[in-house]
Image (spheres, rainbow, N blue to C red):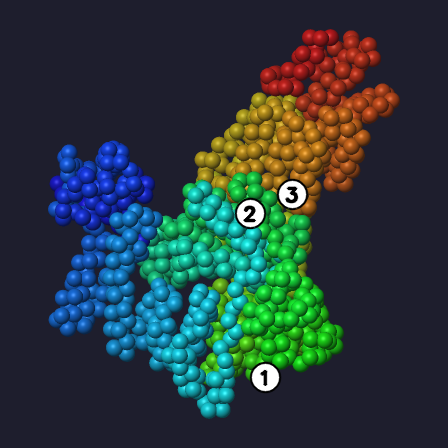
Amino acid sequence: MMMPTLHIRLLGDFSLIYNDRQVTSLNTTRLQSLFAYLVLHRDVPQQRQHLAFLFWPDTTESQARNNLRQLLHQLRQALPAVEQFLSADAHLLHWHPVTPCHLDVAEFEQTLTLADETARRNDQHALQDALEQADNLYRGALLPGCYDEWILPERERLRQRHWQVLEHLLRLFEGQGDHVSAIRYAQRLLALDPLSEDLSRRLMRLFTLNNDRASALRVYHTCVTTLQRELGVEPDPATREAYERLMQQEAPTIQAIVHQPLPAAIPTLTGRKLEWKDLQDAWHGAITAGPHFVLVTGEAGIGKSRLAEDFLLWASQQGAVTAKTRSYAAEGQLSLAPVTDWLRSAGLRAQLRQLDAVWLTEVARILPELFAEQPGLPHYESVTEYGQRQRFFEPLARAILVTSQPLLLLIDDLQWCDQETLEWLHFLLRFDPTARLLVVGCAREEELPPHHPLRTFLLHLRNSMRVTEITLQPLDAAETAKLASQVAKRELDTGSVMHLYHETGGYPLFVVEMVRADLGRAPASLLEADHPHGQPPLDDARTLPPRVHAVLVGRLLQLSASARAFVELAATIGREFTLDLLSTIGNADAESAVRVLDELWHKRIVREHGANSYDFTHDKLREVAYAEISAPQRRMLHRRVAQALEAMHIEEDLDPVSGQIASHYERAGMIEQALPYYQRAAAVAQRVYANEDAISLLSRSLESLELLPAGSKRDKQELSLQLALAPLYRVTKGWAALELERVLDRALALCDTVGDDAQVTDANAQFAEIIAAHDPDQLLYLQESQGVNYAAQARAWQAHSLWCLGYSQQALNRGLDAVKLVQDLDQPFNQALVSAYLALLQQLRADEAVAREHAEQAHALASKYQAPYYRAWAGILVSYALAWEQPNEESIGRLRGSIAEFKTSGARLRLPYYLSLLAQVCGKVGRAEEGLACIDEALAEARTHNERWWDAELHRLRGELLLMHGADASDGEAAILRAIEIARSQQARSLELRATMSLARLWIAQNRSDDARRRLKDVYSWFTEGLETPDLQAARLLLTQL
């Protein structure tokens, strides 16, 4: 029998496969390091003494030997069939070189040897094959998570060999005239050494040869920015000459701008010493203690982005993997777009190939290009259950955390972040407690109202992990002077500094812009008047101080006419943009577009963003530029943007931009064109389980639809939208949501006028056939497609009815049956649903300890599977349990807050019951008046919405609270008697028992014990089950005392 092969991967990450199974027992860095050393030095037996000193150089010889013995013991336990691979005696350790084994490092070096041989033979085709194979084998640094001294020179040696491979491939393809392939390798080399001006020049030349001057220009822009930011230097003359040659290749009429000076150097970070220390502390905490989240807040222009981006650069210099993204105020951004940006970043993108196909398939929902890169990758399945959304979160988390290096993620403008990304971030930060992960977010404080999703995100996050919150304040006068002097490149006199400080309030953005405006010799009137054209326009730009607003407008007025036109286009786009998009919208030729973009970059209006895009240097510039566009011009520009996006994306590629196209068409007043794209964007959102976003998009469609002329065509479009909304509301808000009721009512009304009777009849017939045949597969499909398991929900509802009727044990059995049913069918959303029902049932049974446990389980499930209605339901029960155990201001306030949150959803079902819980707690602490107010509200709700099942209990509680409040005994007795009357009319034996016990206690106090015993005994004797429940035990105890 053939011996199984051991597959060892040390490049990029550690992986061990034996007999086609992953070996996970070598799970410590030191164990992997020893294993790697032995296999990399497999040709030479290793002395124990040498190994002991190599791995523990700072300990005594005896301690080092003892450490080695323990580590070898762990290795023997962890490595399968260890005797086939490793031999050991008292002095030597030896890896058997003839044992079947595939080692990626060995294969990499063997391929390099083959490449050398083919190079000597001058076999260019074979040389290319060998070099490409070597490149594929080098999946990353040698054991990147290990920092033992022996590995550092070996890691660097292999890195240098791989560099030589890329360099050789670059020269090879360049010599063949294959500029596209040469560019690809030049980009990879530049990513490894971004400070190399030689590589920047080579890449600029290759792009030029490939007739892509725009990309060549971007390489130069990135080179200048990187040198200024990291080294504080300008590019050398050779790089500057390459740029000038690039620009001189264009028409002579546009050469005047070629000799303009370089843009002003980026000023160093001023002030922020305490904030910088907070960030460093958070980073070290993430390295040593697991995931950490930092939120940097402050007003626009305060310097949040600059602080965070400088810290991102610092972390990358420490060897961390970094990635950044941002959100936009402009509509049309896809759900999870920031996550997509992170995964496409240079630091994370290359490492995705380490993921197993089962995870990559799900990641391809937001990175569809993976299917083209890996043709054999299975396609993801369509969504049939909302609970699958949570399972989608895990592959994304694994993709982000695939790197073994410390990881820093930055997301700017969190105030505009979509709900799905926030919920996924919460999942990511709790996914792996050992991950060396720091997430830094920036947000405008003024755009975070009390109920903003980011505040909810923080509230939940603080309960489970460490969160650092940094609030930036304006610079003081001295710091303002230092920053202004850096930008002006000279010291400013005290009067100028104080004037600048007064005008800018110490906001770094405003300081920089006002000084730059002065350097650009802006007309004095711009610095003195409120606005060049009178009153500043509305929109977000009005939040700027008038003179700062005037300065920004003045900066835009300094641009050439063609550059100002491009600024208008870029502001209309509302997010990052490519030169291709700007050229298409503006109908500009490539040469003119390159020239204009270079002007905007030199004037610090735009900067590089992401892999191949540009963006405004600050959102306030975008806001001011957009505010300067007249309303008719805006509509025209939005139409051109939408049409350009359509033209630049083939049919299959429209999904990622469908939301943007819809928004631009709507702003252009072209509702008919916007509607199909809104619906397409909603379908894209559902594909990644972003149901809330899908609801928002469809709701926006309905609002836009109202602008179209009334008629059957509009009604048919509305019917389609309403029917698409119904299952989304059912899943996210529950059956009792008012939104669902309104949608279905409207859909039914529309069916009467424009519905297709044949289709309705056919659907009803098919449903009848399914039920009649009781085909389990078809029935299950139907249930899942509707987002609910009817059999489970029927049992859950029946449990509550049985309790009211007095069958407490049968009620519990039905509730447990419902839980088991959805567990067996693996329906996560329905697990949340029936858990909420079971938690409420336990509260009805008055078993407080069990009720709290089930409520917490229900709340966890509803949170995990994103069922907001049932999360609010369970949240009330959890808050009640805590308040009942420890009734104080904090716990009662939390219960009030939970009920208020439920109300804000628009739901009203069971609200009288929830208010009665608050009334009970108020009564427990003697706050009878507050309790009575709750009961009055509950009774009003019950009458308004005709929800009468809990009326008996409400009247009973009202009677007890009246007696507690000192009311006349006859008033309290009348309320309790009313409760008994209602309970009897509803055959609600459990509620009748409670009311009768309240009446008995009152009569005992009035010396009517005989009447009390007779009345209570008649009710108690009816019960045949649930005798161990607290209510029946209390009744039995009361009878024994009478």
Q: Determine whether the residue tagged by mark 2 lies in a helix, strand or loop.
A: strand
The outermost residue toward the bottom is 252
Nearest the viewer among 528 and 946 is: 528
Q: Residue at x 47, y 84 (%)?
A: 258
> Which amino acid type is marked by label 2?
Thr
On the image, which quarter does residue 898 sit in?
A: top right
Q: Nearer the viewer, residue 895 or 743?
A: 895
Q: Nearer the viewer, mark 3 or mark 1?
A: 1
Nearest-to-viewer mark from 3 and 2: 2
Relative to 869, say whether 708 is above or below: below
Which residue corresponds to the image point at 58% horizontal and 46% vertical from the top-left?
458
830 or 889, nearer to the observer: 889
Q: Which residue is mark 1?
A: 561
Residue 835 in percent (x, y) is at 55, 34
Identify the residue shown where x is 57% and y is 22%: 809
Quadrant location of the N terminus? top left
**Secondary structure of residue under mark 3:** loop
* Mark 3 closeness class: few <14, some 14–19, many ≥20 residues within 10 Å: some
For disc 3, the marked residue is: 736
Q: Residues within 10 Å of mark 1 (few under 14, many from 20)?
A: few
Among numbered discs 2 and 1, the one appearing first in the sequence:
2
Q: Sequence order check: which comes first, mark 3 or mark 2?
A: 2
Q: Residues within 10 Å of mark 2 (few under 14, many from 20)?
A: some
Name which residue type carries label 1.
Answer: Ala
Reading the chain from its start, which is encountered first: label 3 or label 1? 1
Alpha-carbon distance for marks 3 and 1? 58 Å
Q: Is residue 397 above or below residue 58?
A: below
Q: Which residue is mark 2?
A: 468
Q: Quadrant of the C terminus?
A: top right
